[in-house]
Image (cartoon, rainbow, N blue to C red):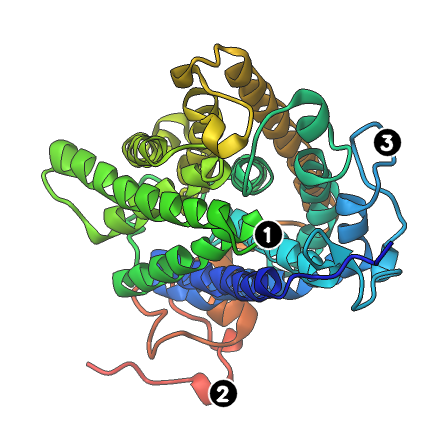
Amino acid sequence: MAAASADTGDTAWLLAATALVLLMTPGLALFYGGMVRTKSVLNMLMMSFVSIALVTVVWLAAGFSLTFGEDAAGGLIGGLEHIGMSGLGPDSVQGTVPTLLFATFQLTFAIITAALVSGAVADRAKFGAWLVFVPVWALLVYVPVAHWVWGPGGWILEKLGALDFAGGLPVEIVSGASGLALCLVLGPRMGFKKDSMRPHNLPMVMLGAGLLWFGWFGFNAGSALGANGLAAAAFLNTLAAGCTGLLGWLCVEQKRDGHPTTLGAASGAVAGLVAITPSCGSVSLLGALVIGLTAGAVCSYAVSWKFKLNYDDSLDVVGVHLVGGVIGTLLIGVFAARSMTGGAEGLLYGGGLGQLGKQLLAVVVVAVYAFAVTYGIGKLIDVTMGFRASEEQEQTGLDLTVHAETAYDHGVLGHGAPVSSSVVPHAQKVTPQA
């Protein structure tokens, strides 16, 4: 029997999709960076960029094997056969693509999931603590959930039968629940609910959202793992849901506040893209339009919950990614179409409540697991080395106090206490001008 060989068309598409998904993390860095105040812009960018390096090392060392290795514990975790990427040469094939390419594609998902969490603790997390948190969290939270959903023998995939095409559970719900846990560990920012904490650069936010949307086509359509009709359907569903998410958010803003905003447009598009991520390969175009619209409208209200419940989710990871991920994952149970899934059908298409129940169980288990384990990791780091920046660092700004840089000339002026000369590098000491 001839050895399996990679399909060149599928391989070419997945190479492009992998590059697109990797670009999402710099896009996220700009999206988040524009949303914070001027004194912590570079720190926000760094939290995303350093996640690329940290998660890559962990993934190549053990993450890929524990996620996609043969199941070793009743659907809970993969085996150790590919530790250090052992046994995976250029001729190894996963389906119709090289295994090394498949591993790299999946790596980009792990990277952006870690980076997403940083938005919940913007302006106040120790950078050193973040360097410790990311690799531990990737192994203990992301990797097990990804195995449950996508790995061979994973219990959500093969035992429960819940559907998740491109990452509603391991990416969106995990990042949202983890962000909630971490912002509870660190507590609210100084001045939360008192000081103005408006985005400092909305054009940067819009640029970041555009790069995220662009990369999301690789994220969702690439998950078909081939240049085929399913990839095309996922691509169109992704575009459609992003559009209706944007419109849904703007409609709520217009009705509630009297003003459609650029931040609302960017956030609404992201909310729609979040919600369609798990469902893009399971629902029809009609389902995608409704899912995006629902997410845009609901998430526009959800981002205000932090003020009522007193948790400081700085950049709305909970309100957009957790809530949007839950909406998209649950609505598979309503809109799943046999023409897309090849079998499972949602409530709207005569499938009954069975699939909806499976989706709900998967959402609850993943959210609770991610929250509990992340809270434990965060607490342990906080007790041992401290997770929160000092009051002086937070007041002055993390850019100058941690990285010895500023994003803009005089970028820290007008934000709290005067900058101590002890934290300003000689080359950056300036005399304020009238």
Q: Amino acid at mark 1?
A: Leu
Q: Position of residue 155 (x, y in %)?
A: 73, 27
Alpha carbon separation for disc pair 2 and 3: 56 Å
Disc 3: which residue: 73
Residue at the spot of label 2: 426
- Label 3: which secondary element: loop
Between residues 122 and 404, which one lies in front from this camera angle?
A: 122
Q: Nearer the observer, disc 2 or disc 1?
A: 1
Inter-mark Cα distance, 2 to 1 = 52 Å
Are the two marked residues, 2 and 1, in contact with CB atoms closer than 8 angstroms?
no
Q: Quadrant of the N terminus?
A: bottom right
| Above or below, comparing residue 326 to residue 170 in the picture | above
Marks 2, 3: nearer the viewer:
3
Residue farthest to the left?
A: 258
User: Looking at this view, is 52 or 36 the one in front?
Assistant: 52
Q: Residues within 10 Å of mark 3 (few under 14, many from 20)?
A: few
Image point 60% across, 39% down: which residue? 170
User: Secondary structure under badge 1?
Assistant: loop
Residue 225: give its label: 1
Say whether disc 2 or disc 3 marks the residue closer to the N-terminus. Answer: 3
